[in-house]
Image (tube, coloured by chain):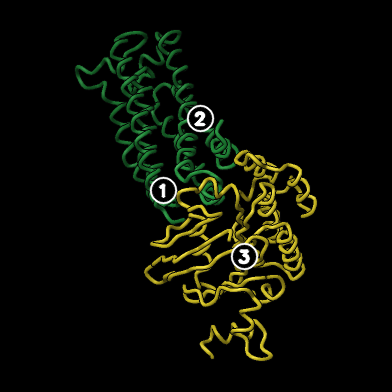
Amino acid sequence: MPAILRKELTLSASILAYLFILFALMFFIPGYPILCGAFFVTLGIFQSFQAAREANDLVFSVLLPIAKRDVVRGRYLFVCLIEGAAGVLMALIVLLRMTLLSQSPVYRSNALMNANLFALGAAFVIFALFNLIFVGGFFRTGHQLGRPFVIYVIVVFPVILAAESLHHIPGWEMLNAFGTDALALQLGLFVLGLAVYLSVSILACRKACRRFEKMDL
Amino acid sequence: MIVQVQGLWKRYPAFALADVSFCLQPGRITGFIGRNGAGKTTTIKSMLNLVHPDSGEIRFFGLSMPEHETEIKKRIGYSTGTVSWYPRKKLRDIAAVVKRFYEDWDEDAYRRYLALFGLDEEKTPLALSEGMKVKFNLLLALSHRAEVLILDEPTSGLDPFSRKELLTLFTRLKEDGVAVFFSTHVISDLEKCADDIVYISGGRIVAAMPKADFVRQHCLSGESLEDAMLRMEGGGV
């Protein structure tokens, strides 16, 4: 494990970042906007940023014998690790709901989004928005947390609302597929969500590295 | 010379570092003196690549800082008396993370200085006095065999006993060949241990020379270093 990631995990991270991974379990809750679970995972990471800022983490990290861009990479690596852990937990729940629980009446009568592969892809899009807007926004200044988080919230909730309700549009019902129905479409949407996550996160990290390199601390 | 700062300029709306130049030699203690807001911290931050100067050059061990940042940082140590890192983490945990960044981390030296400084690894920085915080930073720096110590107001907020203890430690480190560069606005610190003086006022270097030369050139007959600097800072002759 790179030393900078170990530093992120043991010194910079707030315990809430780890605990809030459990919000992925919201994928089990029927009649609830399950994508809020993805938002709460990012809220835990936000707490970590706050704790790290109060601990003078950025200056401490920059003084370590690494390039400044590695400080940014380490932080993105940490964020992606938390999001990845939540993603794995969500994927396991999706698998359960697609198989053993696919006929459960409590899920079948759900007016909101079903926890399927499309939902999993949408969760990764939410993580991508967090990495782009909040994490990228933080590395504009190295200290400002409130503004990028508010912008992220303003963007992410309409996205959650849209994803949760799209299947009510005539012809788009398959977004809410149960079990292995419309599997090709569902898989395609999941892969698309994952691709958006990876590409946006990599681009956001590169941009943050360039900004951070020029920043005075 | 071990460190060379040459023609450093950094302009802010209300302040500017102007053509700051000086050198540090191995095995010597250099006091960096100036009143609050004179530019000491900006200079130190520029030396550490935390602040990007508009122009000028900073070289450690003959290597340019921006191009050899990682290599240089492995050979230098930094401490401040005013900031504490990870106030709620145990010293043991902080040290365990830091040591992984240095291939030549000296665990024996770490244990030796830990005992010498009377630091308890189970404590958190929050539970340390200001002097002990500085000592913890020094412990980390000395455990990776830093050849240059850059210390931003390390004696700030220390009681006279802790200050004396720290200045004695600087002298011991100097004897081991370490270059100690410390900023202060307490002139008596310089009188006690500095070999060289870099005096900054209003963002400009007023003097950068051995202390004996400074006394010869700037102190009037019977005048102490403190009196001379107060006179110079006040615009007197």
**Image quadrant assignment for residue A151:** top left
> In the visual, does A37 lie left or right of A155?
right
Q: Are marks 1 and 3 on the same chain?
A: no
- The amino acid at mark 1 is Phe
Residue B114 x, y percent position in the rendering: 76, 49
Secondary element at image label 3 = strand
* Residue in view at x 40 percent, y 43 percent: A209
- The amino acid at mark 2 is Ile
Q: CA distance from mark 2 to mark 3?
A: 45 Å
* Circle 2/circle 3 CB separation < 8 Å: no
Tell me, by letter, which chain the rendering colours green: A
> In the visual, does A214 lie left or right of B111?
left
Residue B188 x, y percent position in the rendering: 68, 76
Secondary element at image label 1 = helix
**Image quadrant assignment for residue A160:** top left
* Residue A21: mark in rendering: 2
> In the visual, does A96 lie left or right of A197?
right
Host chain of mark 3: B
Tell me if I can see residue B235 in this picture.
Answer: yes
* Residue B182: mark in rendering: 3
Secondary element at image label 2 = helix
Quarter of the image for the C terminus of chain B: give it: bottom right
Tell me, by letter, which chain the rendering colours yellow: B
Residue B183 x, y percent position in the rendering: 60, 67
Which residue is denoted by mark 1 in the rendering?
A212
Nearest the viewer among B135 and B181 is B181
How crowded pointer 3 is (Cα within 10 Å; few <14, some 14-19, many 20+) is rated as many
* Residue B199: mark in rendering: none
Q: CA distance from mark 2 to mark 1?
A: 28 Å
Relative to B156, residue B104 above or below: above
Tell me if I can see residue A51 in this picture.
Answer: no
